[in-house]
Image: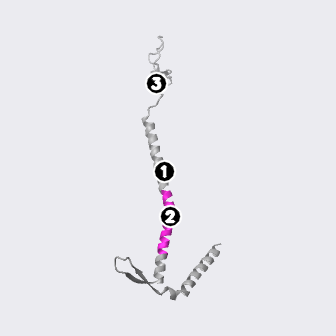
């Protein structure tokens, strides 16, 4: 397929070159131009046909490229705008989430020591005698 594309490209370029070569004398002719605006003197100038064709080709290529790329740039501008709006919405949602107080407060847990049973053999501070003593159970309270 690559060879086919290469041959086709060379064939088209060959025909374009043959066209230019055969019409070389025509392209080198000088064409007089005249501009009459009726409030100034008539403007006259001359150009070769190849200059006029080159200017027309250049202007046509530029205008065609602008018209073809206009939807592309419009789409890119719209995508950038949507991305900015999405980021603003995300930021405002996060700000609202931070500002809004939590409707259900977390439960307050108070730890109250249980009264120790008075026995002559039990030490006064059981936590200091052994490291494996459990903490008293927590009692949740609503506040």
Residue stretch rendered in magenta on the structure: 57-76
Residue that mark 3 sits on: 108
Q: Nearer the viewer, mark 2 or mark 3?
A: 2
> Residue 27 location, x and y as percent?
50, 85
Measured in 3D between alpha carbons, the distance from the residue under mark 3 to the one under mark 1, in whole angstroms, is 45 Å
Check the picture and name the quadrant holding the C terminus. Answer: top left
Q: Is residue 96 above or below residue 77?
A: above
Query: Would you say the residues marked 3 and 1 are in contact, meaning their CB atoms lie under 8 Å apart?
Result: no
Q: Quadrant of residue 5?
A: bottom right
Residue that mark 2 sits on: 69
Measured in 3D between alpha carbons, the distance from the residue under mark 2 to the one under mark 1, in whole angstroms, is 20 Å
Among numbered discs 2 and 1, the one appearing first in the sequence: 2
> Residue 75 location, x and y as percent?
50, 57
Residue that mark 1 sits on: 82
Tell me the element at label 3: strand
- SS majority, magenta: helix
Measured in 3D between alpha carbons, the distance from the residue under mark 2 to the one under mark 3, in whole angstroms, is 64 Å
**Residue nearer the viewer, 18 or 39:** 39
């Amino acid at each position: 397929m690559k060879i086919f594309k290469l041959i086709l490209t060379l064939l088209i370029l060959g025909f374009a070159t043959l066209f230019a070569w055969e019409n070389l004398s025509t392209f080198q002719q000088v064409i007089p131009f005249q501009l009459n605006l009726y409030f100034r003197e008539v403007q006259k100038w001359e150009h070769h046909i190849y200059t006029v064709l080159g200017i027309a080709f250049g202007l046509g290529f530029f205008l065609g490229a602008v018209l073809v790329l206009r939807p592309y740039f419009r789409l890119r501008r719209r995508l950038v705008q949507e991305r900015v709006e999405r980021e603003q919405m995300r930021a405002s949602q996060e700000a609202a989430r931070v500002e809004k107080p939590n409707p259900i407060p977390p439960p307050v847990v108070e730890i109250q020591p249980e009264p120790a049973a008075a026995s002559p053999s039990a030490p006064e501070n059981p936590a200091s005698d052994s490291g494996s003593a459990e903490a008293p159970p927590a009692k949740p309270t609503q506040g």
